[in-house]
Structure formats: C-alpha cells, structure tokens
Image (cartoon, rainbow, N blue to C red):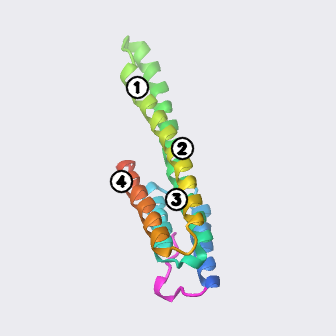
Amino acid sequence: MITPIKWDLVRTDPQWVSALATILGDIEDSAQADSSERQQLQSQLQTFVQRSPERVSALDKIAVQASVDIMIVDLTRRVAEIKARNAQLEVAALALGVEVDAANRDAGRLVRITAEINKAKDAITTVKDMVARLGDDNADAIDTIRAILDGFSRLNEIYRPND
C-alpha cells in the first residue's frame, strides 16, 4: 500500500527527508506490487521533485534515480516474461513445426529498448551534474528538472503495461 504524502504540509528539510524516506520505504515494500502501484510510486517521486525546494536538490537526485530504477525493473521483468513465453512457444512450435522468429524479434526489441533506457539513465546523470554546476540559477535548474520529469512521464506512458 502506498502511503499518502500531504505535500502542502511538507516544508522543512527534515520533512522533505521524511517524505522521500516514506516513498522509498513504499518502493521497498512494493517488490511484488503490480505495475499500477509502481506507476503510482513513480508519480509520487515526480511530485516530490516538482514540489521540493532547490535547497534539497540532493534529495531530488535520489528521487529521480529511484524513478529510473523502477522503470528499469519493469522493463527487465517484461523482458524476462517475454523470454519465458518465447521458450514455451518454441517448445510448442517445435511440436507444430512453426518458427518463432517474430517472438524473438519482439524480445530483441525490448532488449534494445532496455539498453536505450540505460543510456538515458547515463544522460540523466550527466544532466544532474550539469544542474549541480548551475549554482544559484534556480530557474534553469528547475526547468532542467522539469524537462527530465517530462521525459520520464513520456517513457512511463510508452512502457505502461495493459494491466
């Protein structure tokens, strides 16, 4: 179960730390959760980054990384599920004399997508470093973080399973 955060009451640095700790605790507890719950957790992480003040930007980095990690776990699970189905299909196809090229292409496509997500993760780390170097220019840092979150939102929509 996801713990609701009362964002309007989160103001002090200890409250921001507590809010992120709560979300991360929910993520740990959600190991067997369905994708809908994991998406809700990603949404909470995005809300955290959007609402948190610049002074806790180190926490934003942790939240962004946690969001990326959830996405990668989802993709990895899907690839494993597809590979398992492909193995089952291959056994059945051998009995039927049917090839499984199309299914293998789909699995290969997901493997390539996962590789691209990993590249995006590296790019995000680079952007986070750039934001840290921006110094006191809060507007640029906030715009950069929002752009990253927009990208996560689009990726989240693309990889949302049909639960």
Q: Residues within 10 Å of mark 3 (few under 14, many from 20)?
A: many
94 part of magenta stretch: no
Determine which residue is flagged by label 3: 67
Q: Position of residue 67 (x, y in %)?
A: 52, 59
Q: Which residues are magenta?
A: 1-12
Of labels 2 and 3, earlier in sequence is: 3
Q: Give the camera-side residue of 160 and 134.
A: 134
User: Could you tell me how far apart the alpha carbons at marks 2 and 3 are, in whole angstroms?
Assistant: 13 Å
Q: Position of residue 41 (x, y in %)?
A: 49, 65
Q: Secondary structure at mark 4?
A: helix
Indicate which label's residue lies in the foreground, 2 or 4: 2
Of labels 4 and 3, earlier in sequence is: 3
Q: Secondary structure at mark 2?
A: helix
User: Could you tell me how far apart the alpha carbons at marks 2 and 4 are, in whole angstroms?
Assistant: 17 Å
Of labels 2 and 1, earlier in sequence is: 1
Report the amino acid beneath label 3: Ser
Looking at the rendered structure, which numbered label has been put on residue 157? 4
| Residue drawn at (49%, 68%) of the image | 141
Q: Residues within 10 Å of mark 4 (few under 14, many from 20)?
A: few
| Residue drawn at (60%, 67%) of the image | 24
Determine which residue is flagged by label 1: 105
User: Could you tell me how far apart the alpha carbons at marks 4 and 1 are, in whole angstroms?
Assistant: 22 Å
Determine which residue is flagged by label 2: 118
Disc 2 vs disc 3: Cβ atoms closer than 8 Å?
no
Q: Position of residue 23 (x, y in %)?
A: 56, 70
The answer to whether 44 appears left or right of 23 in the picture is left
Secondary structure mostly seen in the magenta stretch: loop
Report the amino acid beneath label 1: Arg
Indicate which label's residue lies in the foreground, 1 or 3: 3
User: Could you tell me how far apart the alpha carbons at marks 4 and 3 are, in whole angstroms?
Assistant: 14 Å
Disc 2 vs disc 4: Cβ atoms closer than 8 Å?
no
Q: Would you say residue 44 is visible in this rendering?
A: no
